[in-house]
Image (cartoon, rainbow, N blue to C red):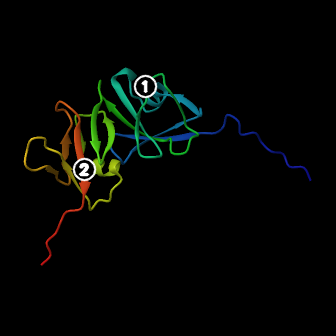
């Protein structure tokens, strides 16, 4: 008994998800396994492409800047989530000793927890150089990244004095 096998070459598609927070609400389908940053932005109607910053969330939780003409292999595991920002610059910050770049002057508290890989019951603090206390980033708020220098954050559980 002979079975015909259809060739799937060229018919494979790759779904990507984009957003400016960890919900990645936008979706697009690309049919080429290797695309440029420009093609990713075009797939979600971000034009002119030079006005946008594109960051790939890697499988190990890092953020990698993707330049317009840089290629991305969508066949690699975990290569489908991108942060996209209308911005001409990136802002550096550290959280729990890991450095990230971000495309906006502020970053939401819940996004900091997502990037740090901690649970929602953790608290985020921003180091305040030269001040007695660090700044607690309250749930639902955002931290400012626009000040000069690299902002430093850390996470942990609140201490309780149960009595």
Q: Quadrant of residue 146?
A: top left
Q: Which residue is mark 2?
A: 154
Q: Determine the residue positioned at 35% across, 27% down.
A: 52
- Name the element at disc 1: loop
| Label annotation for residue 67 | 1
User: In the image shown, does 3 or 81 lie closer to the viewer?
Assistant: 81
User: In the image shown, does 99 or 32 lie closer to the viewer?
Assistant: 99
Mark closest to the chain's N terminus, 1 or 2: 1
Q: Determine the residue positioned at 28% across, 45% down.
A: 95
Q: Residues within 10 Å of mark 1 (few under 14, many from 20)?
A: some
Reply above or below: 92 against 125: above
Q: Is residue 106 left or right of residue 51?
A: left
Reply above or below: 73 against 155: above
Which quadrant is the C terminus positioned in?
A: bottom left
Residue that sits furthest to the right in the current view: 1
Q: Is residue 133 left or right of residue 105?
A: left
* x and y percentages locating residue 50 in the rendered image: 37, 21
* x and y percentages locating residue 63 in the rendered image: 39, 39
Q: Quadrant of residue 49?
A: top left
* x and y percentages locating residue 126 in the rendered image: 18, 46
* x and y percentages locating residue 85 in the rendered image: 32, 32
Residue that sits furthest to the bottom in the current view: 163
User: In the image shown, does 3 or 94 lie closer to the viewer?
Assistant: 94
Reply above or below: 36 against 24: above
| Label annotation for residue 97 | none
Q: Determine the residue positioned at 52% across, 42% down.
A: 15
Marks 1 and 2, how far apart at CA = 29 Å
């Amino acid at each position: 008994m002979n079975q015909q096998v259809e060739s799937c070459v060229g018919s494979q598609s790759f779904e990507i998800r984009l957003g400016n927070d960890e919900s990645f609400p936008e979706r697009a389908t690309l049919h080429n396994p290797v695309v440029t940053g420009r093609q990713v932005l075009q797939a979600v109607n971000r034009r002119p492409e030079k006005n946008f910053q594109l960051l790939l969330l890697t499988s190990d939780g890092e953020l990698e800047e993707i330049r317009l003409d840089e290629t991305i292999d969508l066949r690699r595991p975990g290569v489908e989530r991108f942060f996209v920002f209308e911005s001409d610059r990136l802002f550096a910050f550290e959280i729990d000793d890991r450095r990230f770049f971000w495309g906006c002057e502020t970053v939401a508290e819940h996004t900091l927890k997502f990037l740090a890989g901690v649970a929602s019951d953790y608290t985020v603090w921003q180091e305040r150089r030269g001040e007695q206390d660090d700044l607690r980033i309250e749930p639902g708020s955002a931290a400012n990244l626009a000040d000069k220098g690299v902002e430093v954050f850390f996470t942990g559980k609140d201490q309780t004095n149960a009595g």
